Amino acid sequence: MIDVAILTEKRYLNLSENDDWYVSNIIKEDGLVELELKDLGISCSRVAWDDNFNPSNFRFALFRTTWNYFEELDSFMHFLKKCEKRISFINPYSQIIWNLDKKYLLFLRDSGINIPETHLVKKGNFIDLKALCVKNGWEEVVVKPCVSAAAWNTHYIKKISSDAQSLINSLVKDQDMLIQVFQKHVLTSGEISMMMINGKYSHAVLKKVKPGDFRVQDDFGGSVSVYAPSNHEIEFANHVIQSLPFQTIYARVDIILDNRGSIALSELELIEPEMWFRLHPTSARNLGFAIQSFITS
């Protein structure tokens, strides 16, 4: 039996670094993790969660580039339920379920973590967008599904119009949605991603938007660079991790400056965060040690 399945998705199997920059990054990221695990004497194999995955072949399953899970949510939930009694997930199953839905942001807000002003709209409920914005003094908003990643189905609404209302109406027919006041500093200061391994800060990157866009992801033309966070920024990330009702093996804490100029949590990624080991190759060893400790405990 193999120790660890490094989970990807079937479209990312059997690829070459020569395919394109995006594929090259995926291969590098997964490859660095695989190399470190093997160097630590941990047997592992890179397999797809959505390609007849057999949990009986592995002791543990590490989520890495399973980046289609929110598009295939029913299948992914079936995969989790089918496997969770037969294999140990990294991060654990209960944490994956908790982090699947962005309503975790409301839990963290209630635990004292600063997040952008946020309003939850439940599936099937009508919300008067103009009234909401007038009540809260919002001029521009971002609307995102509670279950999503990589800015999927995320909309930046600059003008509260009948078209914007129609968009909201169509979105909430099928899913819970979050409406957040737009954070203007994202356009200039970007978003900082801090990688936390075994609850401790490991490394960070700065993501900045492409001119004319609002999304920081490189999928949409954004840039990524090595970043050295301040002590204050690291303290904020530590506070986020310490506010969780469990201990994580890995996490990514994404922070921005809110409209008041204060640090705010934009996302907490516990499932399959991109961790930019290719920019910090030695940090993959940190994850390797954390996994070694977990599987031998």
Image (tube, helix red, strand yellow):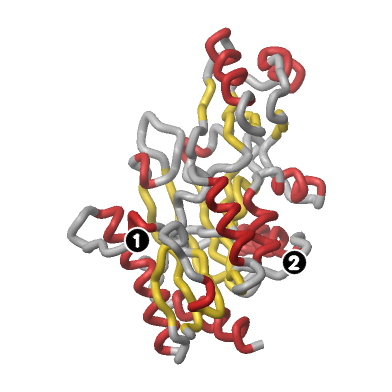
Task: Check the image and report above or below for 98 versus 295.
Answer: above
Tell me, yes or no, whether the two marked residues, 1 and 2, touch with CB atoms within 8 Å. no
Residue 190 in view, yes or no: no
What's under tag 1, amino acid-wise?
Ile
**Which quadrant of the structure image shows residue 14?**
bottom left
276 on left or right of 250: left
- Which residue is depicted at the point 43% across and 60% down? 65
Q: Quadrant of residue 233?
A: bottom right
Q: Which residue is mark 2?
A: 246
Please tell me how crowded label 2 is: few (under 14), some (14-19), or many (20+) other residues with Cα within 10 Å. few
Q: Which residue is the site of mark 1?
A: 26
Which quarter of the rendered picture does the C terminus lie within? bottom right
Q: Position of residue 118 (x, y in %)?
A: 70, 34
Q: Position of residue 11 (x, y in %)?
A: 33, 54
Establish if 38 lies above or below 209: below
The residue that appears at 70% across and 62% down in the rendered structure is 94
Which residue is pictured at 44% across the width and 62% down the height?
A: 52
Residue most toward the top?
162
Circle 2 SS class: loop
Q: Position of residue 19 (x, y in %)?
A: 20, 56
| Residue closer to the observer: 42 or 198 | 42
Residue at the far left in the pictured view:
18
Q: Is residue 144 positioned above or below 285 on the image?
A: above
Image location (x, y in percent) of residue 164: 56, 15
Looking at the rendered structure, the number of numbered marks drawn on it comes to 2
Residue type at mark 2 is Phe
Disc 1 or 2, which lies upstream in sequence? 1
How far apart in space, not on screen, are marks 1 and 2 (Cα)? 29 Å
